[in-house]
Amino acid sequence: MPSKDTIHNRVKQAIINDGWQITNDPYVISYGERFLFIDLGARDSLNLEETESQLIGLEQDNAKIAIEIKTFRNQSPVVDIEKAIGQYTLYKLLLTQVDPERIIYLAITEQTYNEIFDEPLGRLVIEELPLNLIIIDVVQLDVKQWIPKRPIEK
């Protein structure tokens, strides 16, 4: 199993603070003889009740997401974005086969968003792939923005 990103626990807490229940850490995809590991699986926890029968129904009725966490640390932001897009695209493709109701998101820091994704190359990637992003304030442990939007509004 791959090692966790340096901001993994901070992103996880921000997602919980935003009203999500972590269901998998990591979320494992089994396809053929391969196993791939997305950092987190979560479902919307708004209006959750504690009974088992309602939790079973929630798998069908509430939004489910998978989150790949990325810290862009290479000297070249282009290399980082290439790697992130490749991983995101592969996971998105696999989820359409094994868990088609689950939406994949790439979680990044505000700094990464401002330095890479809020410039022409990053905006092109967001719009044309399309790329789902969760922008995290890793100091305040808050979700600052969902792109395109939060699957279930609070």
Image: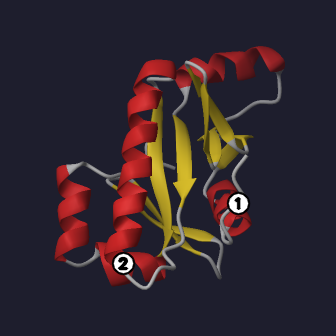
Q: Which residue is drawn at 45% across and 42% down?
A: 104
Residue 152 visible, this orientation: no
Residue 115: where, in percent of width, then height? 35, 84
Q: Is residue 1 above or below residue 55?
A: below
- Nearer-the-camera pick, 81 or 140: 81
Q: Which residue lies furthest to the right in this view?
A: 51
Instruction: Please state which amino acid type lies under the numbered disc 1.
Output: Lys
- Tell which circle, 2 or 1, labels the residue nearer the N-terminal end: 1
Other-residue count near label 2 (Cα within 10 Å), few / some / many at <14 / 14–19 / ≥20: some
Q: Is residue 60 left or right of residue 53?
A: left
Residue 38 image position (x, y, % from top left): 59, 44
Q: How far apart are marks 2 and 1 (CA)?
A: 20 Å
To which quarter of the image does residue 119 belong? bottom left
Is 138 left or right of 145, judged from the image as shown? right
Residue 4 badge: 1
**In this rendering, is residue 130 above or below 59?**
below
Element type where label 1 sits in the image: loop
Q: Residue at x 55, y 29 (%)?
A: 62
Task: Tell me the SS state at disc 2.
Answer: helix
Mark 2 highlights which residue?
77
Give the answer, above or below, for where 69 lies relative to 34.
Answer: below
The total number of labels drawn is 2
Left of 151 or right of it: where is 39? right
Residue 91 or residue 126, whichever sits in front: 91
Judge whether residue 117 can be spotted in this image. yes
The amino acid marked with disc number 2 is Pro
